[in-house]
Amino acid sequence: EEQEEDVLRDLRLFLRYVTESLAQDRRFKAFAKPVDTEEVPDYTLVVKAPMDLSTLLTNIDEQKYVTVDEFVCDADLIWKNALEYNPDSDPMDRHIRHRACALRDALRSIIRAELNEGFQRACEEIRASR
Ligand SMILES: COC(=O)N1C[C@@H]2C[C@@H]3O[C@]2(Cc2nccnc23)C1
């Protein structure tokens, strides 16, 4: 009912704030858009579920997420994919892995700092009722 749509609207506002905070950080430029599979033809052979910050924003607008945890599952793909695709000891791989770990930590830190426990529970009640 109306109250549920109010909660889910607030969830979308919160998730856009989190995503845009990450997208503004220059360290995370490589994660802003999908990896170009023409430039990197073997990317989809290695990474089965590509994800990036712009796709998260599209998913939010398309009302894909009913809880913060569902959003975090997709957001975690961004740094997990980067660790998986860039495993080598060469400086380029080490550099993007360092940024992937920084993204992981920034994501968790923003959510822990800004998410109200009661609000997360209200979202989970809606998910359980559907
Ligand atoms: C999240 O970003 C990544 O996992 N990558 C891996 C790709 C390999 C390397 O860097 C990426 C893009 C790229 N494009 C052209 C040539 N080489 C590269 C970004």
Image (tube, rainbow, N blue to C red):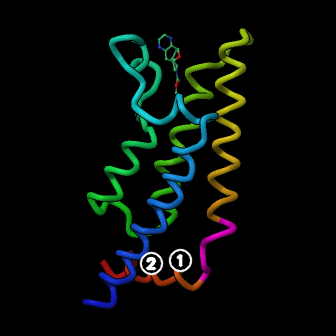
Q: Secondary structure at mark 1?
A: helix
What is the magenta range? Answer: 112-117
Closer to the camera in the image, 34 or 41 = 34
Q: Residue at x 35, y 17 (%)?
A: 37
The residue wearing badge 1 is 120
Whether pointer 1 and pointer 2 mark residues with C-beta atoms closer than 8 Å, the reply is yes
Location of residue 29 in the rendering, given as x and y in whole percent from the top left corner: 54, 32
Q: Residues within 10 Å of mark 1 (few under 14, many from 20)?
A: some
Q: Residue at x 51, y 44 (%)?
A: 23
Q: Residue at x 66, y 13 (%)?
A: 92
Location of residue 57 in the rendering, given as x and y in whole percent from the top left corner: 38, 51
Instruction: Quarter of the image for the N terminus: give it.
Output: bottom left
The picture quadrant where one finds residue 42 is top left
The three-letter code of the residue at mark 2 reads: Cys
The three-letter code of the residue at mark 1 reads: Gln
Instruction: Quarter of the image for the C terminus: give it.
Output: bottom left
Q: Which label was assigned to residue 123?
A: 2
13 w.r.t. 110: above or below: below
Location of residue 15 in the rendering, given as x and y in whole percent from the top left corner: 47, 62
93 w.r.t. 118: above or below: above
Closer to the camera in the image, 113 or 4 = 113
